[in-house]
Image (spheres, rainbow, N blue to C red):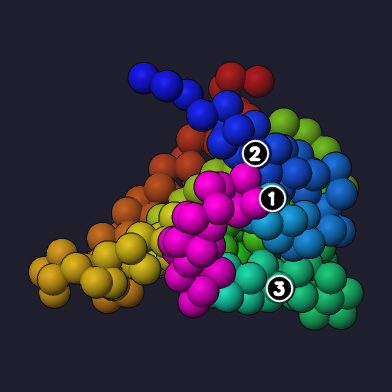
Amino acid sequence: MMLDTKLIFFGLLSLIIAIVGSIVFPQYEISLSALGIIIAIIGSPENKRKQSLYALGIGTYFTLLSIFVLAQVFGHSKIGINGYIENILNKNNNNILPILVLSYLGTLSTEAASWATAVSPIVYKIFPTHLGAWALGAGICAGSSSIITAASAGIILAHQTANYEKNSRVDFPTYLKIGLPFSLFMLLFYSILLPLYINFIR
């Protein structure tokens, strides 16, 4: 098997810009993600660039973009949701369950990566511990399984199966029947596990 070193280089470069760049410069997250996509397209063979660009569909890109923008609005609203979340966490600064539940509901309302980016600075400021990070991650993990738009993979899955025959298509109602109960089970599991960690393991 022959490896295309050019594709590997541009693929890794686009991932580094989109992922590492967003961690180092979170305020430019959307711009860096867009730049990563552009670089990945440039690195594709010339006769397949258009095909690569439209692989997920323009609708999928706009859906993901709108969700990230929505989460950033939540995260930067000083008198709105951001202030509400910070107020709840400040009043319960010895309890990680509010982080867990708010992370679950926030992810369910927006999307996993966008919610993590928007809210993690608030959680870190109030709970600068590994346990606070685990509570944030656990809530996001549970919430991302709830509905099809709560994770980027779900949005892509819905688009990729849109052209399949009716019985094979994954849409919002069919995903909800499995995703929501499973996510509630995960939320319950983490709600029991994390307090046990505090009381017995530590």
Q: Are marks 1 and 3 in contact (CB under 8 Å)?
A: no
Task: Say left or right for 126 vs 40.
Answer: right
- Where residue 194 sits in the image (x, y, percent)? 55, 36
Q: Nearer the viewer, residue 13 or 115?
A: 13
Q: Which residue is mark 1?
A: 39
Residues at marks 1 and 3, CA–CA distance in whole angstroms: 22 Å
Q: Which mark is residue 69?
A: 3
**Element carrying mark 1:** helix
Looking at this view, is 175 or 32 the one in front? 32
Query: Which residue lies under the disc numbered 2?
Result: 10
Spatial distance from mark 3 to mark 2, Cα to Cα?
27 Å
Percent across and percent down for residue 110 are 58, 69
The numbered mark, 1 or 3, whose residue comes first in the sequence reads 1
Which contiguous range is marked in magenta?
A: 40-61
Q: Residues within 10 Å of mark 3 (few under 14, many from 20)?
A: some
Q: Amino acid at mark 1?
A: Ile
* Tag 2: amino acid: Phe
Q: Residue furthest bottom?
A: 80
Residue 198, picture quadrant: top right
Residue 172 drawn at (x, y percent): 32, 74
Q: Is residue 36 visible?
A: yes
Say which residue appears at 42% left-offset and 21% top-offset: 2
